[in-house]
Amino acid sequence: MTRRVAIAGVGISKFGELWEQSIRDITLEAGMLCIFDSGIRGGDIDAICIGNMSAGRFTGQEHLGALAADMGGLGNVPSYSVEAACASGGAAVRQAYMAIRSGEHDAMMVLGMEKMSDVTQTEAMNTMSVASDWEWEGLGGATFPALYAFMARRHMYEYGTTEEQLSLVTVKNHANAAHNPYAQFQRPVPLEVVMKSGFIADPLRVLHSSPISDGAAGLVMCSEEKARELTDTPVFIEASTQASDTLALHDRKSITRMDSVVISSREALKKAGLKIDDIGVIELHDSFTISEIMQMEDIGIAKKGEGGKAVEEGITQIGGNSPVNTSGGLKARGHPIGATGVAQIVELVYQLRGEAEGRQVEGVEKGMAVNIGGTGATSIVHILGR
Amino acid sequence: MTRRVAIAGVGISKFGELWEQSIRDITLEAGMLCIFDSGIRGGDIDAICIGNMSAGRFTGQEHLGALAADMGGLGNVPSYSVEAACASGGAAVRQAYMAIRSGEHDAMMVLGMEKMSDVTQTEAMNTMSVASDWEWEGLGGATFPALYAFMARRHMYEYGTTEEQLSLVTVKNHANAAHNPYAQFQRPVPLEVVMKSGFIADPLRVLHSSPISDGAAGLVMCSEEKARELTDTPVFIEASTQASDTLALHDRKSITRMDSVVISSREALKKAGLKIDDIGVIELHDSFTISEIMQMEDIGIAKKGEGGKAVEEGITQIGGNSPVNTSGGLKARGHPIGATGVAQIVELVYQLRGEAEGRQVEGVEKGMAVNIGGTGATSIVHILGR
């Protein structure tokens, strides 16, 4: 009988352009916050797992595992980084989940972080492109905005998805972020402002796109036994799944669906013994708003092609049937790449513990996070329950 | 009762300056070779774990997990990269070990790779420095040759270690590599040539230093049950351990000892129920020859301060009491960073299966690999047995 894995504490830095903080500062901040939140003694943490995509290019520092152990004063504990593009954070959570289940560790700290604002915008865009198929996509100039624009245009063509629907995702996510003190953008934006913002890659506008961000998020993950010693409100990981797809968009059967999300979300629900309607709060990976719409369809809260319509109907709003991105999502909470997958879990834990304040979903028992890499070449799904 | 983990197949590309091959080519080569060696069906591999340090900077491509799944035609299997500087390969082996023990996966492919020769020497040196403490070391110009020179000079001062002893490590490792068809340098070098080679950071000379290399290595790792279906000669992982130390050299109590190696090797022997004298073949991390001498002391095949003397006495030669780096080590096999930790395991498997040809150690039952990151901020130890 493999043991259950629980989250005993969470912490998150403010997301944004943090000019006054280095990657060390935000790593330490998120680490200290999750340790304090869990009440664990530092000496009881027996390993560290880092989610990070590209600190080597963004900041000149890799070997972040050893750095975190060193800076945190956690001594000689094993420590390492995991990379799966924009899903690096989710991958780190999943590695810790497996490490604890294997019996190798009892209590781990998981930290996701990225510091993206210390390089020029051009270098930031190039660095993000290393997550695409560089030889076939990035090298030829197909940046992520361009790739997602292909997906959006095709979704509009096949299913009649509208610019207004793409924009309503932004409106919702900004409205949620207004209640989230660690979000990068804490103010609502009206629909007409979104729809008049400049194009970055037609049909996608700047306000359909997640920003370049700095930030870090942390979890203390433990065996059930250890978690119960630490807290009366452990949150359990009920499923952790992952699937891949082709790296390049042009190799896929369809570009209006992410097979990796379809597979990993179905498998997660099966492992947890749940149906999608049992999930009370969902964090999706809205790197661009079309991504949230596609994932709504891929996980099954909307029928294929009807994601845009479902946004209009408000099913993903707080108070709707399936609230999505109560945190503000990548769009408004911000998207420091390696931090995102961990930040999603932090939000679910706040929701499940009833601590999400102005954005709290009432009576939520189960939450799901979908963290993808690239244009969906990687998808990692976690289901949490209290 | 947690299950045992076995290695069912291994594969390795030629190491060297592979101008005619991209990172994709060598990844595919090592992947295909380990699949063929194990006899596993591609469809039975249920996850991929990659060891890589800095492909984002060296080649412009990250998200190597998804790339490997895609290129190998392995479909939607979970796939991700692990980074722990020069110990990234060992970290990938360790993650797969935990994933299989957790029950999450039955058969995994582990691939370590690095393609370092596509950038200038200056950029390669800068990229390696991201594994040091960038703010305190790399940024100030303390490259790895410089940092290891500090360690060597201090070891000479404290213990009387000589230039000749540092050079004899090179002579031994090149002699071994002459029998290793995948080594970067397959010819012996005489002592006087080593001792007259140019300084790169006094007292370290170019022939005391591992080269810049391209290469990939792969393993098929399975549950014991699955391995026994595939092969009559499974090799078992009897212990997997890891420890950290401060990232910067100047923060340590001693720079002539790597505490991370002391801790992780002791713990590995304890877990495997063995003494160091039970280990018949050892791969150490000789990024510089002083590193091999220090690690000999740290794992206990030589007393503190007597590593140099033990090299002179020949205990680490094939035929000696504790043969070290039969593969040629990092010095002569080459050191494509993310590949190294996996290549060490490949060599141990060849030795334990009796397939190491001209460099075979007779009657070997147990092997140990020590894979370090930076100047020892990370150490990962594996003990293998047949």
Image (spheres, coloured by chain):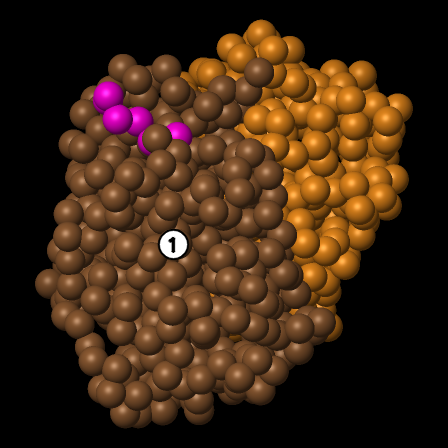
Chain colours: A brown, B orange
Q: Position of residue B186 (x, y in %)?
A: 74, 51
Vertical order, A338 against B250 (above or below):
below
Horizontal side of B55 relative to B161 (left or right) equals: right
Q: Nearer the viewer, residue A62 or B228?
A: B228
Q: Position of residue A361 (x, y in %)?
A: 26, 47
The amino acid marked with disc number 1 is Asn
Q: Nearer the viewer, residue A144 or A72?
A: A144
Q: Position of residue A227 (x, y in %)?
A: 32, 21
Horizontal side of B305 relative to A139 (left or right) equals: left
Q: Which residue is mark 1?
A: A321
The residue drawn where x is 23% and y is 69% is A174
> What residue span does the magenta drawing correspond to?
A231-236
The residue drawn where x is 39% and y is 20% is A224
Principal SS element in the magenta part?
Answer: loop
Question: Which element is circle 1 on?
Answer: loop
Vertical order, A356 against B25 (above or below):
above
